[in-house]
Amino acid sequence: MLATLGLGGCATYQPAGAFYTSGQMGVDARSADASKEGKACMESYVGLIARGDASVKTAMENGGITEVASVDYTVDNVLGIYGEYCTVVRGD
């Protein structure tokens, strides 16, 4: 039970590895053709502090995108201690 309480608030992602998670998941796709890519990220520290802006709007602005072709979600997480969660938008 102590392990459950200790790890319950850690940065998580589904599917999640016990020690390390790295992956990409598709969220939405209208087209596979795109000339630009924008990325917006958030960070999580021990599941206690999370900060950043991983919104589609910010990813579009970062990539100079006005028309969305696809949206993906990426994650890198180490032991639930540090996690980076990003929205990746492709379009024109």
Image (cartoon, rainbow, N blue to C red):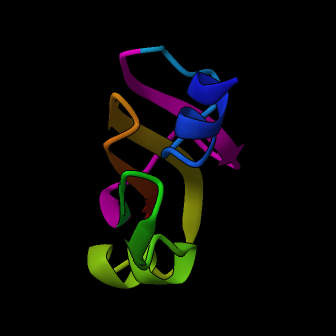
Rendered position, 26 above or below 84:
above
Residue sitting at the far front: 2
Q: Position of residue 59 (x, y in %)?
A: 41, 73
Residue 7: image x %, image y %? 54, 34
Q: Which residues are magenta?
A: 19-41
Residue 92 seen in this snapshot: no
Residue 41 position, x and y percent, is 36, 65
Residue located 50% across and 44% down the image: 10
* Quarter of the rendering occupied by the C terminus: bottom left
Residue 64 seen by the camera? yes
Rendering quarter of residue 4: top right
- Prevailing secondary structure class for the magenta stretch in the rendered image: strand
- Residue 34 magenta: yes
Residue at point 46%, 63% (across, down): 48
Residue 26 in the magenta stretch? The answer is: yes
Residue 68, x across and y down, in percent = 57, 66
